[in-house]
Image (cartoon, grey):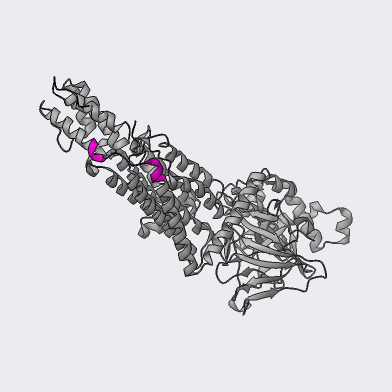
Amino acid sequence: MRPAGLAKMRPMGLAATLALIWIPVFLVGSGTPLWAFGVFLSIGAAASLGFKRRFELTPTLQAALHVVVLGIGLGLALLWGRSVSPSPKAGHYVTVGLLCLAVPRLYLVLGRLGHGVTLAFALIAIMGLSRSMSREAFGVLVSVFLILSLLEVVASRAHGLRAAFGEVRLRWKTALALTLALGIMAALGSSLPAAEGAVTEYLGPYMGEGQTATSGYSEGSTRIGSYQQILESDEVMLRLHPSPGVALDSLKAVPERLRGQAYQTYRAGTWVAQTQADDITRLEEAGRLEFAVPSPGSGDTLEVELAGELGRAVFLPEHSAALEALPTGTAMDVLGTVRAPTPLDPPFYRVRTGGLSETPPQSEAGDDDRRLPPMLLKRLAKLSGSMVSEGSSPARRSEGSSPARTIEAIVSSLHRDNRYSLTQDEPPEDDVVWFFLSQSHAGHCELFASALVLLARSQGIAARYVTGFLVRERNELGGWLVVRARDAHAWAEVYIDGHWKVVEATPPGPLLASRGPEPGELEHRLDLLGHHAWKIVRRLQGLGTLELGALLLSIALLSAVLIWLRWRRVGRRPPIEVEFEALRRLELHLAGMDLQRPPERTLINHASVVRAAGDEASAGLLEAISALIYGAKGDAVELERAVDERVRPQGRPRAP
């Protein structure tokens, strides 16, 4: 009977199964955009190179490695879960731990492309994560991957690291992969903190870094064009949940916009919000911030869930009447912008709609709301004057102009003479807004809104530039409204008849068309998965020390039981001494033929020497022994008999 042993082991074990299943779950739960699944697929492809190959570790060593890497993964997960103020991107720390679980499968495989290519493939996949994680997480990920890989090579090679490198011809490939990893880390400023400033400044335009805006919000200032990459992202940023028991169709008014930040001052393509410390109202106690008395029976209560990286931002729908469940120190400035003192934890707050005013309370129009850059003043005044003249009928001109009619004429002209485009040409030397109005005539919401604000000011009408989100997606499976990064938007607020009015400057048709196809059931199921994954994570964050210890102990016991059951199913491996005894006798036989193997020569290389000497049978046996020891290929008992047949003196009877 063929003994059960190492030759029957499969590389797809418990650790790799858990890792490859849960990596996409945590990628979704951490708010990572869908392109991250490309990273997951490449990791899976790298691991799959060895799925049908034999594995070279004994069951005992495999069990030990599983326990070690599982402990590392759980440790990183608990470290993140117990952190004081975790952010959505902290979910990548959990991904780091799960990748550690897959290290044995990613590295110790004998695929057709070999160890070096597998290692390089996995490292390139890890590099893909560097764009969406912190430098600290990226450094931990690569360092743990390389260290564990190196340690496992040493642990799994009977003849030591030097012989192992020669056995699999790994030296130059590993050196190339390590050089590539270190080079990319240095280029990203991850391993050279002293050079971080220079590296960021040089690579910023190419890596999409160094911009002042985040999705839908930028505290203090924002540069026109900073949303260009954001508008192509499917990452979920917010979810709006109706009150328990209330369906989406039962809402009295579904919000169209979420207001983030308002800006007053324009300087060469950059909008700045200038507010003084004494102009800020702070919430002295955790609780409710009221704006206005809602109209009876006209409002809804919505719970806003921050699913993306949005810092301290608090977003308000139109006609907001009050905010609830806010921490102490939450502030609202004179521009109607609300900020929390720190990133919200838990990332929820409630808003009551039904207020009479379209915008939150803010200061009356002042000089800053009418100020224009001197270099643009005359040009904008001339252009806006022609827009108003062309957009007014003779009857209306005879009645005289009003701020509302002036704004209507400017918006109509902007829609008629310019087209919506996500691509933005860089002006050669001129101001970006003037370049849009006078030459390119193509741009997205930032340019349309900026142009309207500046043109309105040139006609003496106070106006402000506002950023936030549009609300355009319903997840019927979950029963909430979804806001993605690509829903980031900019519009104008104009002071008319003593009130601030929202004015949409972007053409509505192209704006909706630019959003691409509507998310389907798959995207909504992924969104549902992400929401529930975060509920589990938040529950873990609330566990006490005893509960956490009990959970960890339960997981450890369950893992030990599963590993033990698998070890029993696989069976015991024949003693390794059988293989080395066969090798020892074969080498003694070859030494008698002046073909002794030096210690530094690998079995494969020695087989070539023996074959060149004319002993094809012994060379084949050396190759078979090498495959059994290092690749778990072949049958130890059959190989023992073959070696015995080869080295047995002629005429000696074969042992039964």
Would you say residue 382 sits in the magenta stretch? Answer: no
- The structure residue drawn at horizontal position 61% and vertical position 56%, both measured from the top left corner, is 531
Identified at 33% across, 51% down, the residue is: 147
Tell me where the magenta segment starts and ends, as one range: 566-578
Give the x, y percent position of residue 77: 46, 59
Residue 478 position by quadrant: bottom right
Total numbered badges shown on the rendered structure = 0
User: In this view of the protein, which residue sits in the foreground, 492 or 378?
Assistant: 492
Left/right of residue 115 with respect to residue 457 in the rendered view: left
Q: Nearer the viewer, residue 516 or 368?
A: 516
Q: Is residue 501 above or below residue 28?
A: below
Q: Is residue 189 visible?
A: no
Work out whether 13 lies above or below 606: below
Q: Quadrant of residue 162?
A: top left
Residue that protrudes farthest toward the front in the picture: 656
**What is the magenta segment's predominant secondary structure?**
helix
Residue positioned 34% across, 31% down in the render: 2
On screen, residue 288 versus residue 32, left or right, reads right
Q: Is residue 549 left or right of residue 344?
A: left
Residue 409 seen in the current view: yes
Residue that appears at 40% across and 56% down = 72
